Amino acid sequence: MFDYSPKPDHKFTFGLWTVGNRGADPFGSVTRPHKTPAELVHLLGEVGAYGVNFHDNDLIPIDATLFEAEAIKKDFRKALTDTGLVVPMATTNLFSDPIFKDGAFTSNDPRVRAYALQKTINAIDLGVEFGAKTYVFWGGREGTETDSSKSALDAIQRSREAMNFLCEYVLDRKYDLKLALEAKPNEPRGDIYNPTTGHMLAFITRLDHPEMVGVNPEVAHEHMAGINFMHGVAQAWEAGKLFHIDLNDQYPGRYDQDLRFGSRDIKAAFYLVKFLEDVGYQGSRHFDAHAYRTEDYEGVKDFARGCMRTYVILKEKAAQFNADPEIQALLAEINADDHAMTPFLGEYTTEKADALKLQLFDRPAVASRGLQYERLDQLTIDLLLGVR
């Protein structure tokens, strides 16, 4: 029987903010007690995770004294040693504190922008201290409720200035660190700048050090915008910019639900896992999701195990898809090429363009061909439902 338990080479990671989420929402208070970062590391070790990621204030409260911070770090480091977990990624909380009520890097107040930079470089130091190789930026407050309040052009330029500053800081300190930008269309702001992965990819091209900066796409954030997440991931991969990825699930058009991976749209989750495995993605599979508010910490463990188990099951299904004789024969037929069009396709030449202008195409004959996508899709459904 296939073993669906997590293995270190799966590189499954969770944030302290995920398993440490206490179940509060805008309409209700917490339903789970507080656990320390060290306790959460042990919880993740128990369920078989590979690593743990954190915001700066997930680990060290924003108002902690130096003495308190050192004590927390000591306990956290011991928990990592005891469990064997690693810290592949870190990030900064630039959205919770009231000072960021109108943004961080895009705030109209230069004091806020300066504090955001200070907080971020300190948090980068903290991430590197624990071995992080990727640093993620989610601009949760970088947006508006009314466009009367802020120039969108200024916001773009301020964002670029901040990222250029932080790239230079990483270079100056000689850190082995990649930076990844995370998009979201809205929430908590009415509109957030650079709302999709595609926007972020375009933004990166205008940075002083675009080679240092990639993206961290999240399933829920793209599905909130009604976008096919796997397509955005493929675009990031093709551009060499898939530096990290956040896995969860989401009903389109709703608030950011952060559901257990694969719990809502199993077909979309399958195509995503298949893509990551087919191209050989080597980064973390990070689950940025929360257990239901109904759960105690045993339920949180069930949630974490479920995220990982679903990924491994879908990984097996992807291998089955790639080995299925009927599916592969159908794909070969769909993609058959008699090379008659080879003289007209590929790299441009003047001769090729001139020959293409003279080529005759039997449009009705080409259009009349059935592509058998219905059959292919049903074979995929059969496979996912376990009847193949």
Image (cartoon, rainbow, N blue to C red):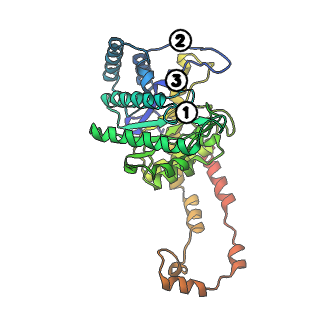
Q: Residue 140, which numbered label?
A: 1
Name the residue rendered at 50%, 82% in the picture.
343
Which type of secondary structure does the marked residue at label 3 adopt?
helix
Up-down relation of residue 241 to residue 126 (above or below): below
Distance from Cα at disc 1 to Cα at disc 3: 13 Å
Q: Amino acid at mark 2?
A: Pro
Camera-nearest residue between 168 and 148:
148
Q: How many marks?
A: 3
| First of labels 1, 3 by sequence position | 3
Name the residue rendered at 58%, 31% in the picture.
260
Residue 351, how many percent across, how many down? 49, 86
Q: Residue 99, which numbered label?
A: 3
Q: Residue 33, which numbered label?
A: 2
Which type of secondary structure does the marked residue at label 2 adopt?
loop
Up-down relation of residue 168 to residue 31 (above or below): below
| First of labels 2, 1 by sequence position | 2
| First of labels 2, 3 by sequence position | 2
Distance from Cα at disc 2 to Cα at disc 1: 26 Å
Camera-nearest residue between 31 and 315:
31
Q: Check disc 2: other Cα within 10 Å, few if <14, some if 14-19, many if 20+.
A: few
Q: Residue 57, which numbered label?
A: none
Residue 44, how many percent across, how many down? 44, 24
Residue 43 quadrant: top left
